[in-house]
Image (cartoon, helix red, strand yellow):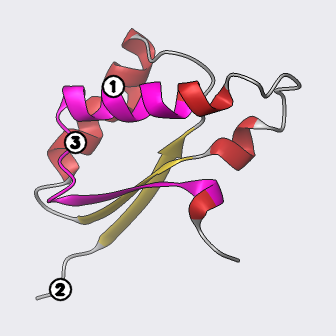
Amino acid sequence: MNKQRILSGMRPTGRLHLGNYLGALSNWVKLQDEYECFFMIADWHALTDRTDTKGIKQDIKDVLIDWLCAGLDPEKSTLFVQSHVPE
């Protein structure tokens, strides 16, 4: 039987905090064992209320590091940056 798919993401607006972990990330870690998961760093979405973009590259790296440290496994889930997906 095929696994159901999940697509979710976070905007890279700074370092992750307890709310990110409890609200989404801890659930993502659990879901990756049962579902085909696609987790996106939503950098295009971050531009909706972010006027200063000079730190966004570092924020993207920080989010990815936090995700890996929290237990997201690139062998079990697809992790990607929204702006890297061709139209």
- For badge 1, the amino acid type reads Asp
Work out whether 22 lies above or below 46.
above
Work out whether 85 lies above or below 40.
below
Region in magenta = 60-83
- For badge 2, the amino acid type reads Asn
Q: Residue at x 84, y 38 (%)?
A: 48
Q: Residue at x 57, y 17 (%)?
A: 14
Name the residue beneath numbered marker 2.
Answer: 2
Q: Nearer the N terminus, badge 3 or badge 2?
A: 2
Q: Nearer the N terminus, badge 1 or badge 2?
A: 2
User: Dividing the image into 4 quarters, which one contains the N terminus?
Assistant: bottom left
- C-alpha distance separating marks 1 and 2: 29 Å
Which of the labelled discs sits on residue 72, or is there none?
Answer: 3
Name the residue beneath numbered marker 1.
Answer: 66
Mark 1 vs mark 2: in front: 1
- C-alpha distance separating marks 1 and 3: 9 Å
Q: Is the residue under label 2 in contact with that under label 3 (CB below 8 Å)?
A: no
**Would residue 53 be found to the left or right of residue 87 on screen?**
right
User: Dividing the image into 4 quarters, which one contains the C terminus?
Assistant: bottom right
Q: Residue at x 33, y 71 (%)?
A: 5
